[in-house]
Structures are given as C-alpha cells and as structure tokens.
Image: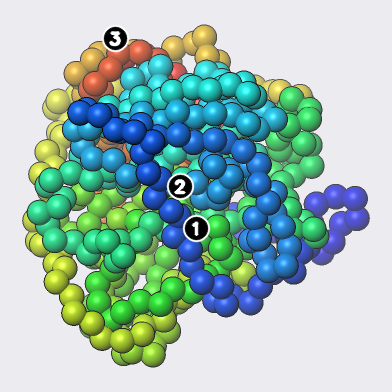
Amino acid sequence: LSVSGGPNVTTESSAGAVLRSRARLPEPFTLPLSVPEVLRPSSSDATTDYYELTQRESDLEILPGLHTRVWGYDGRFPGPTIVSRRGRRTVVRHRNELPVPTVVHLHGGRTPPEHDGYPTDLMQPGARREYVYPLDQPAATLWYHDHRMDFTGPQVYRGLAGFHLLHDDEEDRLGLPSGERDIPLLIADRAFAEDGSFDYPARDPSLRGEPGVTDDFASGVLGDCVLVNGVPWPFLEVEAVRYRFRLLNASNARRYRLALDPPPPGGAAFTQVGGDQGLLASPVLHEELPIAQAERFDVVVDFSAYRPGQRITLVNTLGESGTRAVLRFVVTRRARDDSRVPRTLAEVEPLSRSQARVEREFVFARGGAQHHGMTLWTVNGQAFDPRRIDADPELGSVELWRIRAQNVPHPIHVHLAPFQVLGGGPTTSGWKDTVDLDNGGEAEILLRFDGYRGRYVFHCHNLEHEDMMMMANFEVR
Ligand code: C2O
Ligand code: CU
C-alpha cells in the first residue's frame, strides 16, 4: 500500500482515507494503560485555584524503542488532568513555548467569551496568557484542547489535548466508583512515520501557513493505530468490581462504536451515568456505545460479572483490523466494592419545544466556498468568517436549532450553550454540547444561552472540516 513520495493511504469503508503507519507498531494489549497525572495548583486562595501549564515540545516513547515528538501541555500527551470543584474558580496560566501560535479552549466549559479560546485569539510563541474559568456548572467530564483557526487538526494531532474534570456535591453524594476506580480514557487514532513521528498529511502547516490537509484528507485524517491516554492498544488490570470510565473521543475524524468482548453475562456492557455536560437524570444501559469526535460518555462497567483471570476487550465494532481493538481489561481478583449506581442521579430539567422563541436552521455540507483550490466545508453555504455573526440569541433564552448534515456525517459542537436533543435516542440523553449527525441526518436541539454575552463559535468537530471552515459565530445579546 506504500505510495512512494506520498503518504500511505488506504480506505476504510464509510470512513474515508486512512494513513497507514510505517513505523513498527506494538502487539495490541502488551503495554500498560497510563493515566494522565493530575495537575497540582501552583497556589490557591479563598475563591480560586491557580494552575500553570507550558505548551512545549517533547520526545515521548509511544512506540517501544522509538521517539515521537509531541506538542503537549507540559510536554505530555494527553496533557495533565485538571480537577476542579463547582463553585471555585479555576485560573490556568499558559505559556506558549511552541514554534506556532496557539489557542486554548475548554470544551464544554461555560466560559466568558474572552477566555473561551476564540479561534483568532492567539497566544504567539513566547507569550503567556491567563484563562479564567468560573465553572459555575454541574459536575462533568470536560476537556481542553487547541483551537487555532485553520490549524486545530494538526495541533491537536500533535498532542494538544487533556482532561478537565469538574466535581460537585451532588455527584459526591451518589457513591459512584471513585478514586483509583474513576479513570478517564482519551481515545485517539494516529499514524506513525517510519521514525516514530506522528504522520499528518503532507503540507506542513507550521511551515506554510496553509490549512494542514490536502484534498485526499478532506473527509478527515484517520490513523491506523488506536491510542488510549497516549498508549497504543493498552491493557489495564482491574479488580472484579465496578469502575467508572470517562470516555472521550479526542480523535480528529474517527468515530467509534464501543462494545465489550465478551459482553458481561446477564447485564448491559455500559451503564451510562453522564454525558457531555454532566450527570444524567437516571442511568441508561448500553450494549454498544457510538462515540463521535469530542463526545463524552461517563459510564460504569461492572467487572464482578466476570471471573478473575478473564480478559475483556473494549472493541470498536466500526473498525477494521488495527482499529477494531481499543483496550484490554484483565480481571485480577475479587474485591470489596462499596460503590453504587443509584436509580436517580441528578436533576435534569427537560426543555420543551414551547420554551423556544426563536428557531434557526443550519446545514453542514461541503461546497459554496473555495480556498487554495479546495472546496471548503461550510455552514449554510458559507465559510467561517470571524466578522460575520450567524445567530444572535438573547441572554437567558432558549432557542431551537434544526441542524442538518450533508455529504458525510458531521459531529456538531456548540460553545457555551448546553443543549438537549429533541426526540433523540438513548445515546443523546441529558445535556450535551456535541451531537453527531449522519449523512443526510437532521436533529432538533434546544439550546439554553445562559451566563455570558458575547461572541462564540459553533462548528463541526471533525477537525479537518473545522479547519476547512465548517464553523460559524453566534453572539449572545
Ligand atoms: Cu472541542 Cu470548538 O471545540
Ligand atoms: Cu464535518
């Protein structure tokens, strides 16, 4: 499959072009999972915790015996996990030691516009900047990542992503698995060049100042190796008890449909307790979990259904060969378990259609605009333009947006405003910030614009589509 002088590309049904690694990949399930370290505040006062992060290059041993140059928060991939508590302010002081401008966005955060990481609100190389997060919102699995206009795909691919977990008292009272048994899992596919470096399509965006993809990858960049917390196809030893996993699909373009192989006898594989924006009203059971880019599923897996010694594989039923495997659990022993999954989790006020005073429609499709000879991905036929406001919701209001996807599926993400999917299925329960649309699919979402006035973006979270302008603005007035 090697094409000399060009990237190694093949196609995976329904997904698009896949970059094939030329470096030697490890046998699946031979490397232990690592859990990103929790960042300690550099200081705290009565109201606020202060953190410091340096965005810098480093060489990590992701593939045994080879080095991968990453762009990471504190040089790590994933970045350190930030853990916050509702009601306390979090301030993160970033310093950019990378050779390119960057932008930090807290995905899922309800953040004032000047701290939300607007795509042109750049930190130049050498710059420092303070991001202030009030985090006056329910406990949730949030994540932070780069958001530089035109370059989010290549910059996240090089490593600029990490977890930001938010806790509150309501969650504490539930008795869900916690501590060592509450594990964030950042799932992302990559391809590796022969020397172990991350492979991303040809035009080097850091050198050229052009969007980082060529037409071959217009549908999105897919790799052939699945990393969990930066480790290729790792294994994790678990006791025969309940665990809570915060699943995040941080891939640029790949979707997964997760299942356990073998499934637990006599029970559902995943008990979902939370979605993008926090805890659900009550748990939802899933045999399989489709997870699109940027979505989070907070799930409990009960390993007491398995025998000590048993191996259970977290598989991606959409994948072929290498991208079918994700992670392997190895059950070690029986153990005491005081955790619970209560039938009632959190208060989730259901929004109704009648609350929406304004309706809008947005079509996500390819076409309508060109750039460097490439057909762009657009919203209502228009390429992203920071100067154009595409919606002007009122502060405190609820709106209904009818969103549609054409050409290929698009996972749509709205900054600031959490939403509920009208008439959605079990995988769209609760408050969300990202919803996946099939090709030709449509969803009606009810959004609540609370918190702050100002300009924010909404966009497709296929990062190559986003970089090719599938993004628009709303301004809360
Ligand atoms: Cu996860 Cu606008 O981003
Ligand atoms: Cu898209």
Residue 153 spot, x, y in % from top left: 61, 38
> Could you tell me which residue is drawn at 36 percent across and 85 percent down?
332
**Marks 2 and 3 in Cβ contact (< 8 Å):** no
One can see residue 468 in this view: no
Residue 149 spot, x, y in % from top left: 58, 25
Q: Earlier in the sequence, mark 1 or mark 3?
A: 1
Residue 436 relative to residue 146: left or right: left
> Pointer 2: residues within 10 angstroms few (<14), some, or many (20+)?
many
Residue 289 relative to residue 326: left or right: left
Residue 99 vs residue 294, the one in the foreground: 99
Please name the residue that numbered disc 1 is placed on: 229
Please name the residue that numbered disc 2 is placed on: 80
Mark 1 vs mark 3: in front: 1
Please name the residue that numbered disc 3 is placed on: 477
Q: CA distance from mark 1 to mark 3?
A: 39 Å
Residue 474 spot, x, y in % from top left: 39, 18
One can see residue 418 in this view: yes
- Amino acid bearing label 2: Pro
Label tally: 3
Q: CA distance from mark 2 to mark 1?
A: 11 Å
Label 3 sits on a secondary structure element that is loop
Rendering quarter of residue 102: top right
Q: Is residue 113 above or below residue 428?
A: above
**Marks 2 and 1 in Cβ contact (< 8 Å):** no
Q: Is residue 391 above or below residue 311?
A: above
